[in-house]
Amino acid sequence: MKHKTIKSIPLFILLCFVSISSHADSLYTELGESDGINKFVTKAVEISHTDQRIAFLFEDTDDEELIIQISDQICFLSDGPCEYDGQDMDEVHSGMEITEAEFDIFVAIVIDSMEYADISHSARNKLLALLAPMREDIINQ
């Protein structure tokens, strides 16, 4: 009987480790949780205002609200503790007529901003994969 107990202890420890490491390796954690997400989203919005190729798209934007909405959406998508209660992407971008080139410029800015915030390549790629399906809802709306 002692033999079974000794064997079950390593299994219990292994299960605890898997549970802890899967939480520690969540995309939300990899992105730096709320602070990390907010850092790169804020930087992306700042850069978007100064990039003459897309700055006009952000002229009438409430930056504080935009940062909150994008951060909440990324937090939600990355399995963080946030709820996203914003509009659908096609609703938000309706009438903006964003071109593929403008969209790609913003994506490049987001990537640069994640690098600025020391987000790993792996986490960047995971997030971009989650955001990619939104492309259709944003371009030419």
Image (spheres, rainbow, N blue to C red):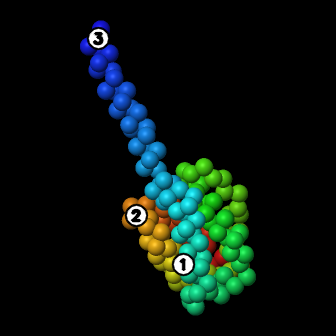
The residue at 48%/69% (across/down) is 117
x and y, in percent, of residue 127 in the image: 48, 62
Q: Secondary structure at mark 2?
A: loop
- Viewer-closest of 133 and 124: 124
- Viewer-closest of 37 and 135: 37
Earlier in the chain: of badge 1 and badge 3, it is 3
Q: Quadrant of the N terminus?
A: top left
Q: Amino acid at mark 1?
A: Phe
x and y, in percent, of residue 48 in the image: 58, 81
Q: Amino acid at mark 3?
A: Lys
Q: Is residue 132 left or right of residue 57?
A: left
Q: Are marks 2 and 3 in contact (CB under 8 Å)?
A: no
Q: Up-down: is 113 above or below 128?
A: below
Q: Count the marks: how many?
A: 3
Question: Mark 1 = which residue?
Answer: 106
Q: Are marks 1 and 3 in contact (CB under 8 Å)?
A: no
Q: Amino acid at mark 2?
A: Ser
Q: Which mark is residue 2?
A: 3
The residue at 54%/78% (across/down) is 106
Q: Which mark is residue 120?
A: 2
The residue at 59%/72% (across/down) is 42
State which quadrant residue 86 falls in.
bottom right
Q: Residues within 10 Å of mark 3 (few under 14, many from 20)?
A: few
Q: Secondary structure at mark 1?
A: helix
Residue, far left: 3
